[in-house]
């Protein structure tokens, strides 16, 4: 006679585990997961079907195999499901006991961390094979290749018949899907004494399409291996002053006529070659100088912004020829050599990514300075991007043939899986902000809708930089038009971003010789943290940023933007804060704090060495002052290495009273606190009354 036993697993997920044993000597157990609601119980996934012929685990000692079967099951505190058993080992009186616990995994819905502990008396060494027999009919199996590259395993199986999936992730051992049906993991050398622990994660749920199962597996792997994917590295100072000094120096620019400047390439080998777009993006450098000028007034910056941006708009844009059709009117060349425009690789094409980024920077420079030429040039690019959309609203490639009198002028170079066109979203959103013409926001939604419908299924060949671009684009659209589907897609792409390995010397991450891709990935991590407040996103951003070599930080304009974003993101540690990286600003309740060039000259922040710090440890502190114009209150954001335990703040030659926003304490001292509670960085968030 069978007896159904049900347990509620987890506290807030609404899932129930049903264990059904069969009577007889060869007892078989079935484990199914269901939900309960007003309509009664609903099956989510048939998970396990195990018995003596299909045991959950098999221990092999000295060539003799011992299958392990379930003897007991129980509900434990915190919604933890537990079951286990014990058995004798041969005729020598040995005893093996085992227990398996199912603990809900934070950050991945419908996923459980399974912990299996084995103990033998007396102590033995053998091999362990874990089997999870899963009744899925003709499953499709998919694995994450990036996990295998790290020595991990991440595999899911989905049945189109039942529209359910089961996913397994593990950080050790050989694991995969068996043709007979179910997951297995082999640990050939395993110490069975002392209650050694084996841990893996198992997820399950409904999957109407394979993309749903893949997305769930990626989220599960990102949550399970969060500590190993991008571990924190040694924190170094994010000092943008050397970059600013290089960008404002007269020798950094080539004079063209009376009112035009070209920013020279930071690579000495490219003398006489000037860029407007990918990979050096001088308009982005000018935008970073504009942001720096808002923080610390620099007399040289306004002139450079006007004449530098004017040089780009006047000389790199494709203009219509009188009486002739011009399919690329409004697009920009990537670079200019001896007056001849080419793409970044000396070819005759125009890139979507390059033009979309240039349009965005020109819009932002126009918002900062009000120069009409910049706005019109950015709108010209957006018109070109709009005309290149296909019937679905997406883009059939990443580049388009330039106008050279050939039959293919203006035609796409086919590359249907390219993500470059997604960058057009950010340009379209800013075009809508500048004009309030709805055609731009509709064009942005068309691009985004393709991503929402596709669920990343067609974009197999992706790089971390491409995924970062998708995330930043969707975040820009969500900021203008918040949408639940957008948020769900952002979470999916965020998990993809975290599982992709960062290889600093690859072309995708180092296209300009200054590791621009790593800066882009870091910016995506900071922006994600502002939305999700998931510390895994912030840890990822700092890991990407610290991979940038010191020489690249001292030469790349992206170091200015990274310095501001890294410090601004620290305000996200306060639950009530709202961050805006584009403004930039931090909103605390009704107060809005933003950069003010008058604050820095009267403020000094000095680090205080920790007593336990090594004598050769570096002592420094990066800090960002923001001012609330309504109250004249100062918000001070501080980042320092663990060798700094506090900072000394001097305002107008006095030590002001500071309020520590993390603890609520008020004092003239400014103690720092470990970031994430870990030992690789200290942070401080303080307000100073006028």
Image (cartoon, grey):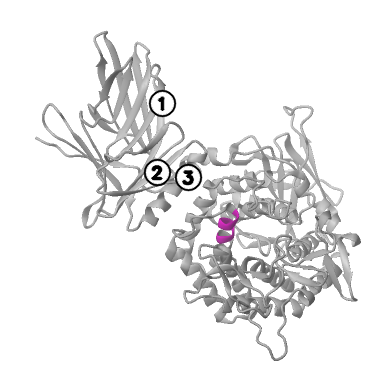
Q: Identify which residue is drawn at 90% across, 76% down.
A: 258
Query: Mark 2 or mark 3, which has the lower sequence index?
Result: 3
The span shown in magenta is 465-470
Q: Is residue 576 visible?
A: no
Query: How far from the left and from the top, in percent, is residue 34?
Result: 26, 48
Could you tell me what secondary structure mostly forms the magenta stretch?
helix
Q: Which residue is outermost to the front?
A: 406
Q: Residues within 10 Å of mark 3 (few under 14, many from 20)?
A: few
Residue nearest the observer in this picture, 164 or 6: 164
x and y percent of residue 226 in the render? 51, 41
**Element class at badge 2:** strand
Distance from the alpha carbon under mark 1 to that under mark 2:
21 Å
Q: Is residue 299 left or right of residue 463?
A: right
Q: Which mark is in front, 2 or 3? A: 3
| Residue at 89 percent of width and 69 percent of height | 255
* Quadrant in the rendering for residue 263: bottom right
- The answer to whether residue 299 is above or below residue 122 is below
Give the residue at x 54% y 72%: 444
Q: CA distance from mark 2 to mark 3?
A: 10 Å
Residue that label 1 marks: 197
Q: Does residue 469 belong to the magenta stretch?
A: yes
Please, is residue 369 above or below residue 467 in the view?
Answer: below
The mark that comes first in sequence, 1 or 2, is 2
Kindly identify which residue carries mark 3. 145
Numbered tag placed on residue 155 in the rendering:
2
């Amino acid at each position: 006679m069978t007896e159904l036993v049900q347990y509620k697993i987890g506290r807030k997920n609404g899932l129930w585990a049903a264990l059904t044993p069969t009577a007889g000597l060869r007892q078989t157990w079935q484990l199914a997961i269901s939900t309960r609601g007003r309509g009664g119980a609903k099956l989510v996934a048939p998970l396990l079907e195990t018995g003596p012929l299909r045991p959950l685990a098999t221990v092999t000692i000295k060539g003799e195999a011992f299958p392990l079967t379930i003897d007991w099951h129980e509900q434990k505190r915190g919604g933890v499901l537990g079951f286990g058993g014990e058995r004798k080992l041969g005729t020598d009186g040995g005893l093996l006991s085992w227990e398996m616990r199912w603990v809900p995994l934070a950050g991945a819905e419908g996923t459980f961390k399974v912990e299996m502990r084995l103990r033998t008396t007396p102590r033995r060494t053998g091999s362990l094979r874990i089997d999870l027999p899963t009744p899925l009919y003709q499953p499709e199996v998919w694995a994450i290749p990036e996990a295998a590259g790290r020595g991990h395993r991440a595999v899911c199986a989905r049945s189109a018949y039942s529209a359910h999936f089961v996913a397994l992730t593990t950080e050790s051992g050989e694991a995969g899907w068996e043709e007979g049906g179910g997951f297995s993991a082999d640990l050939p050398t395993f110490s069975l004494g002392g209650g050694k622990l084996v841990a893996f994660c198992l997820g399950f749920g409904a999957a109407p399409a394979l993309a749903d199962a893949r997305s769930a597996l990626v989220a599960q792997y990102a949550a399970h291996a969060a500590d190993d994917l991008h571990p924190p590295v040694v924190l170094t100072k994010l000092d943008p002053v050397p970059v600013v000094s290089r960008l404002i120096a007269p020798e950094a620019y080539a004079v063209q006529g009376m009112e035009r400047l070209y920013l020279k390439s930071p690579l000495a080998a490219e003398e006489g070659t000037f860029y407007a777009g990918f990979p050096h993006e001088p308009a982005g450098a000018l935008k970073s100088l504009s942001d720096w000028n808002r923080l610390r007034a620099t007399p040289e910056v306004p002139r450079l912004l006007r004449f530098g941006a004017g040089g780009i708009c006047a000389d790199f844009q494709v203009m219509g020829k009188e009486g002739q059709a011009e399919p690329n009117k409004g697009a920009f060349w990537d670079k200019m050599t001896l007056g001849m425009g080419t793409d970044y690789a000396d070819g005759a094409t125009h890139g979507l990514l390059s033009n979309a980024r240039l349009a965005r920077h020109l819009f932002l420079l126009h918002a900062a300075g009000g120069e009409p030429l910049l706005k019109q040039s950015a709108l010209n690019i957006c018109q070109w991007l709009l005309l290149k959309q296909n019937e679905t609203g997406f883009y059939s490639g990443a580049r388009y043939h330039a106008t050279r009198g050939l039959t293919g002028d203006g035609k796409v170079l086919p590359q249907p899986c390219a993500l470059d066109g997604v960058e057009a979203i950010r340009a379209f959103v800013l075009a809508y902000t500048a004009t309030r013409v709805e055609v731009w926001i509709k064009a942005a939604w068309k691009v985004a809708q393709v991503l929402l419908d596709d669920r990343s299924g067609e974009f197999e060949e992706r790089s971390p930089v491409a995924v970062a671009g998708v995330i930043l684009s969707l975040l820009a659209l969500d900021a203008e038009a918040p949408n639940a589907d957008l948020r769900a897609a952002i979470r999916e792409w965020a998990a993809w971003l975290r599982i992709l390995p960062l290889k600093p010397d690859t072309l995708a991450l180092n296209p300009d010789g200054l590791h621009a891709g790593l800066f882009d990935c870091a910016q995506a991590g900071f922006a994600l943290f502002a939305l999700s407040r998931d510390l895994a996103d912030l840890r990822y951003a700092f890991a990407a940023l610290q991979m940038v070599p010191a020489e690249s930080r001292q030469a790349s304009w992206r170091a200015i933007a990274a310095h501001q974003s890294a410090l601004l993101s620290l305000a996200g540690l306060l639950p009530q804060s709202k961050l805006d990286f584009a403004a930039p600003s931090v909103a605390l309740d009704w107060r809005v704090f933003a950069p003010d060039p008058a604050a820095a000259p009267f403020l000094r922040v000095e680090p205080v060495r920790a007593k336990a710090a090594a004598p050769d440890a570096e002592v420094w502190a990066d800090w960002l002052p923001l001012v609330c114009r309504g109250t004249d209150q100062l918000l001070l954001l501080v980042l320092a290495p663990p060798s700094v335990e506090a900072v000394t703040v001097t305002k107008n030659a006095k030590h002001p009273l500071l309020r520590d926003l993390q603890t609520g304490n008020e004092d003239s001292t400014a103690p720092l606190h470990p970031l994430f509670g870990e030992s690789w960085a200290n942070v401080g968030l303080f307000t100073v009354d006028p």
